Amino acid sequence: MIIDKHIKPCYTLKKYEEGLTVEQEQPKKSARIEFTEGMKAAPKGEKGRFAVEFIKSHEDLRQFVLFSLFSFLCFAAEMASFYFVYYICSATGYTEPFKWFVFDYSAAESGGKGGFLAFLISTAIAQALTFILNRKKTFKANNNVVWAAIMYSLMVVVIIIANTALCGIIKDGIAEAMLKGNCTQSATDFVSGTVSKMTGGALAWIIAFLMSKFVIMKKKKEPEEGSTENAA
């Protein structure tokens, strides 16, 4: 039997003898392994460039990274605007105790009505920035912007209400358990407050990412020119 050197290797001898050229499948590497091997192979001065190109070439990873970066950026804007409004309200004496629905601003350190107003304004600024940046840069959405804005606003309202209620439940539960264990009040307040805020923030981030990616900021496939001409 004469073997043609140009015939690519096959898995079975039978297919080879029949003259079939079957591509030898290579096991697909996970993104983690691919990234690790690429970073090891890249020269020292090119590792940063490789990481950026790797992220760009993996769409889900690119969206995850950009969404995270924009979240931190908008969080910074939220904190800056919150304390700015809070300071103005405190300076003008707009600090009357306020309590409505799940929002409790009756404690002195909460800022009362001024604290609630600062919360509303800073949240609106941060969420507006988040919507614009993620729609244009992260998900590159091209669906109806009015519908997307309405759905995003509803999502934010639901997340805020649910997060406020959930954080209160978690905080009270942890505080009760710690006080029964003879922990100090200061330690109890710190731990219960930190854990509840971190838990609520993480859940809110996950829900916002998934809703934005799969429901609110969808990128529709544009019809090809050929199919459009044929339809015409």
Image (spheres, grey):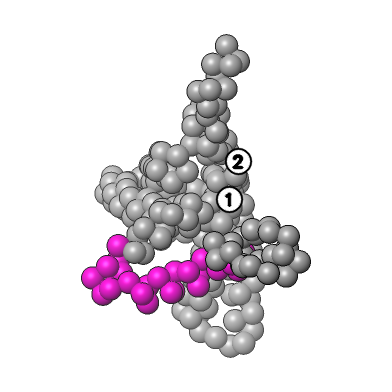
- Where, by quadrant of the figure, is residue 218 drawn? top right
Task: Tell me the chief SS of the magenta region.
Answer: helix
Q: Is residue 93 left or right of residue 106?
A: left
Q: Is residue 30 magenta?
A: yes
Q: Nearer the viewer, residue 110 or 226?
A: 226
Question: Is the C terminus in the top left, top right, bottom left or bottom right quadrant?
Answer: top right
- Identify the residue shown where x is 47% and y is 75%: 190
* Image location (x, y in percent) of residue 55: 41, 58
Return the disc, 2 or 1, that comes first in the chain's sequence. 1
- Amino acid type indicated by mark 2: Val
198 shown above or below 67: below
Residue with the mark numbered 2: 215
- Residue 210, numbered circle: 1
- Identify the residue shown where x is 53% and y is 27%: 224
* Image location (x, y in percent) of residue 221: 55, 33
24 shown above or below 70: below
* Image location (x, y in percent) of residue 219: 52, 37
Furthest-bottom residue in view?
182
Q: Are marks 2 and 1 in contact (CB under 8 Å)?
A: yes
Q: Is residue 143 left or right of residue 80?
A: right
| Residues packed near mark 2 inside 10 Å, few (<14), some (14 to 19) or many (20 plus) | few
Q: Which residues are magenta?
A: 25-49
Give SS at disc 1: helix
Q: Is residue 162 left or right of residue 52?
A: right
Residue 117 in view here: no
- Amino acid type indicated by mark 1: Leu
Q: Nearer the viewer, residue 37 or 85?
A: 37
Q: Nearer the viewer, residue 149 or 179?
A: 149
Give SS at disc 2: helix
- Identify the residue shown where x is 61% and y is 74%: 174
| Residues packed near mark 1 inside 10 Å, few (<14), some (14 to 19) or many (20 plus) | few
